[in-house]
């Protein structure tokens, strides 16, 4: 049986029971992956989230994971990176696609409980994707 090396981050607990990271740079390395490429805005309250990458995920009827996809579709949920327990945001499944570009760089959609706009971010100087 081989052992897997897992990095550890030192934490301390203060007198009030709050956790404090002793090495914030190490934590930042775990939960960030680079410059954000995607922007998600929720209609109504204007909540905005950014992520480096996105996935569209599908669930079985019992709520367990079924499959991951690169493109949106009715019934899929958006998952914003990083793709681990520290993910940025996950929507409920899409119920309606309102608008979208052919290259999927922009999509406006409704979920079971909200309406969102997802767009790929571009560099102003070059017009290239970030």
Image (cartoon, rainbow, N blue to C red):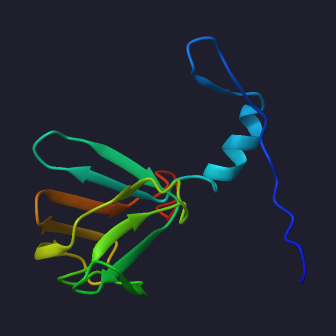
Most extreme residue toward the top, as rendered? 15
Q: Quadrant of residue 24?
A: top right
Between 86 and 12, the residue placed more toward the observer is: 12
Which residue is painted at 19% across and 82% down in the image? 75
Is residue 75 left or right of 120 when viewed as pictured? left
Q: Position of residue 62 (x, y in %)?
A: 25, 82
Between 28 and 38, the residue placed more toward the observer is: 28
- Give the answer, above or below, for where 84 lies relative to 104: above
Q: Position of residue 111 (x, y in %)?
A: 14, 66
Between 36 and 8, the residue placed more toward the observer is: 8
Most extreme residue toward the right, as rendered? 2
Which residue is painted at 42% across and 84% down in the image? 68
- Give the answer, above or below, for where 11 lies relative to 96: above
Is residue 127 left or right of 56 when viewed as pictured? right
Which residue is painted at 77% across and 28% down in the image? 22
Q: Position of residue 29 (x, y in %)?
A: 71, 48
Q: Does any portion of residue 103 appear in the rendered image?
A: no
Which residue is painted at 44% across and 53% down in the image? 88
Q: Does any portion of residue 42 appear in the rendered image?
A: yes
The number of numbered discs placed on residues in the rendered structure image is 0
- Give the answer, above or below, for where 100 lies relative to 37: below
Q: Position of residue 99 (x, y in %)?
A: 13, 73
Q: Quadrant of the N terminus?
A: bottom right
Q: Quadrant of residue 23?
A: top right
Is residue 3 left or right of 20 when viewed as pictured? right
């Amino acid at each position: 049986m081989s052992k897997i090396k897992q990095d550890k981050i030192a934490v301390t607990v203060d007198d009030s029971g709050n956790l404090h990271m002793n090495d914030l740079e190490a934590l930042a390395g775990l939960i960030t992956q680079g410059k954000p490429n995607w922007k998600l805005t929720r209609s109504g309250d204007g909540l905005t989230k950014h992520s480096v990458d996105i996935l569209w995920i599908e669930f079985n009827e019992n709520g367990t994971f079924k499959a991951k996809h690169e493109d949106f579709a009715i019934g899929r949920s958006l998952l914003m990176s990083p793709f681990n327990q520290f993910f940025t945001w996950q929507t409920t499944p899409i119920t309606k696609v309102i608008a979208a570009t052919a290259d999927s760089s922009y999509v406006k959609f409704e979920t079971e409980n909200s309406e969102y706009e997802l767009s790929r971010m571009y560099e102003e100087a070059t017009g290239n994707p970030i």
